[in-house]
Amino acid sequence: LASGMFSSLKEKIGEVLLPGDEFVFESEDTIFLTDNVKPERPVCGPGLRQSGNRLVVSKSGVLRHKPPHTFWMDSQQWRYVPAKAETVIGIVTSKSGDIFKVDVGGSEQASLSYLAFEGATKRNRPNVQVGDLVFAQFTVANKDMEPELVCIDGSGRANGMGVFGGGGLLLKVSLGLVRRLLAPQSDIRSDLEQLFPCELVVGMNGRIWVRASTIQQTLIISNLLQSCDTLTAPQRREQFRKLQKGGL
Amino acid sequence: MKETPLSNCERDFLLRAIEEKKRLDGRQTYDYRKLKITFGTDYGCCFVDLGQTRVMAQVSCELVAPKENRPTEGILFFNIELSPMASPSFEQGRQSELSVKLNRQLERCLRNSKCIDTESLCVVSGEKVWQVRVDVHTLNNDGNLMDAASVAAITALCHFRRPDVAIQGEEVTVFSPEERDPIPLSVYHMPISVSFAFFQQGTFLLVDPCEREERVMDGLLMIAMNKHREICSIQSSGGIMLLKDQVMRCSKIASVKVSEITELISQALLNDKAARKAGGKCGFAESMPQDRITALKMDQTDVEMTNVSQTGSGVILQGDEAPPPTVPSPVVPVPGVGQVGQGLQSWGLEEEEEDDDDEEEESSGDDQVEEVTQIKLSEKDKKEAAVVEISDSEEEEVVILYPETTEKSKNSGSRSDQKGAAASKKRQKK
């Protein structure tokens, strides 16, 4: 059974693994005649690869686990690969016919139909200019096809998506930092909340848009976020404290 | 590959920030980014970091026939390579507009200013002269490639040594570095380019624009100057009209910046020379910053604490000298490295942090050893401190009871002196 493997995997949760580290299923010696339960297999996220009865690490990072059987590697990466249902920040690069071409930082530009906005009809086109920022979601993200974005959810509502970005600053951070920001209990976010009010839009493609009440504050937040990549938690708290003491 | 487009919001934000005299990385209007010069193992190899911008210059030479109209002059050749490594929008092997512009500017800055004595490069008049070739490779582009390239090129030229030659009749012998020491080029002065970006039709001016600032600027003015305040070349691009006052102001700023950078270059060259003379490790690999991504850092493992007092007192008995002082700054300087300019720590906060350049520049050979052993030392420190305290308290009792015991000899140097003093005080009290 795979239970042996699960225990060995669970032992390593939170530890650093390197590409080539391997976990092996124990081959089934006994066949259960009474209960025909399917053997449980781990669900592999990014950085883990399953082949036969082996599970190989393909990215260096920290092993993470989500019950019951999901495992993935938390790593530092800057390169974005589109994935379905992920929300990203894109920059509109061209308007051609009824689609917009959007740069999302992937290998290829994504397409965004002008009908994929809330309340858009053939008559009522959304007001999108080249160079605008859009917060959108992937409906098609396939390695062989052009990725497709929409700015509405399943029920046709904008749900926070659409064109945005007046008066803020866009910055690029690592994908790992974005995931840490978007985690349900994000310590960076809670630290940020104590500083001063600001608006954040976080795309899974490593782009973050920030707006605070003044340009100075926006710059501070953006520099803080960019430095979070190379700071440990105590160092970061120290920085934030210093900033609060600075009496801005 | 196309470069990432600049969004409207970034453009608006940058322009508004510039109007408020704020910059993305917290610099002031006239501030340069952190400039760092390092050398490779070979002579004439130089890396320059200007913030995130990074270029490498390599100087090489060969014997060639001179140009017909200049039979007694050596040849200087400059080449800037914009590799896709620097930015995905640079294409390999194609002369882009930018590379032509940079090449031309570098030539004007270094060849036309006659900063290198080309006549000394002549071996046999009309037959053989040295051709000195400077290859500048861009490794990362975060704006202001020209300044970084000019600093790298002139530093590499100053650092370069050509092989010695001897002429016997018709025969020219080139000596290898083992046979005869190679000869440095004779450099008259060091022209350094300083770039100024203009915004809003010249209303706002920034020194050392970064990549995003370069993309929203209206015009660019590049002034190449040496430390004697002689302008070697001046070029304005982007098609904006500049007033005489503005150009004068820029040249004043440039003269300040150039003297700073020249100072830094000569310091870096000196450091490198000292490091090479000392025979210590030098070169690129030694100068690499050890950037560590600490975001996913794991907690430190607890140190084994049993037998600490025994081993600690053992350490004290063995080594009687206090450990050499460790460098307080987290950046451990390396020979042949100089740094100047504001770090990125200030972030536009009101408190201005002055960089301790001098401290970092005055690096010596044994700093390096320190770097390696720093962790060890600090551990030792800890142990020692703990142990000394314990023995302290013990000793005080001992001292009071038997002032002349041999226990004292355990501690040597200043430590025992202090204790002696303390003990005598105590005795006085009693």
Image (cartoon, helix red, strand yellow):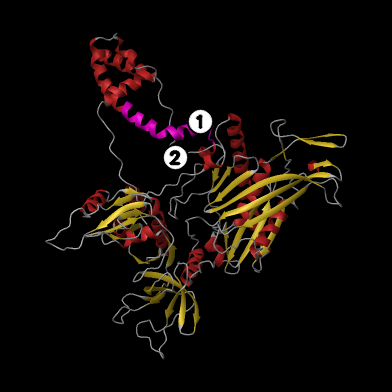
Whether residue B257 sits left or right of residue B390 in the image: it is right
Is A131 located above or below residue B178 in the figure? below
- Residue that appears at 53% across and 35% down: B363
Whether residue B172 sits left or right of residue A42 in the image: it is right
Position of residue B287 measured from the top left corner of the image (x, y, whole percent) = 53, 41
Q: Chain of mark 2?
A: B
Position of residue A77 measured from the top left corner of the image (x, y, whole percent) = 41, 57
Is B102 located above or below residue B44 in the figure? below
Which quarter of the picture shows residue B403? top left
Is A109 located above or below residue B260 in the figure? below
Which quarter of the picture shows residue A69? bottom left
Q: Which residue is mark 1?
A: B366
* Quarter of the image with the C terminus of chain B in it: top left
Q: CA distance from mark 2 to mark 1?
A: 16 Å
Sort mark 2 into few (<14), some (14-19) or many (20+) by Cα contacts within 10 Å.
few
Q: Which residue is mark 2?
A: B329
Region rendered in magenta: B362-384
Kindly state the secondary structure of the residue where label 2 is placed.
loop
Let me know if residue B371 is in the magenta part.
yes
- Observer-nearest residue: A239 or A228? A228
**What amino acid type is highlighted by mark number 1?**
Asp
Label 2 or label 1, whichever lies nearer to me, is 1
**What amino acid type is highlighted by mark number 2?**
Ser
- Observer-nearest residue: A8 or A186? A8
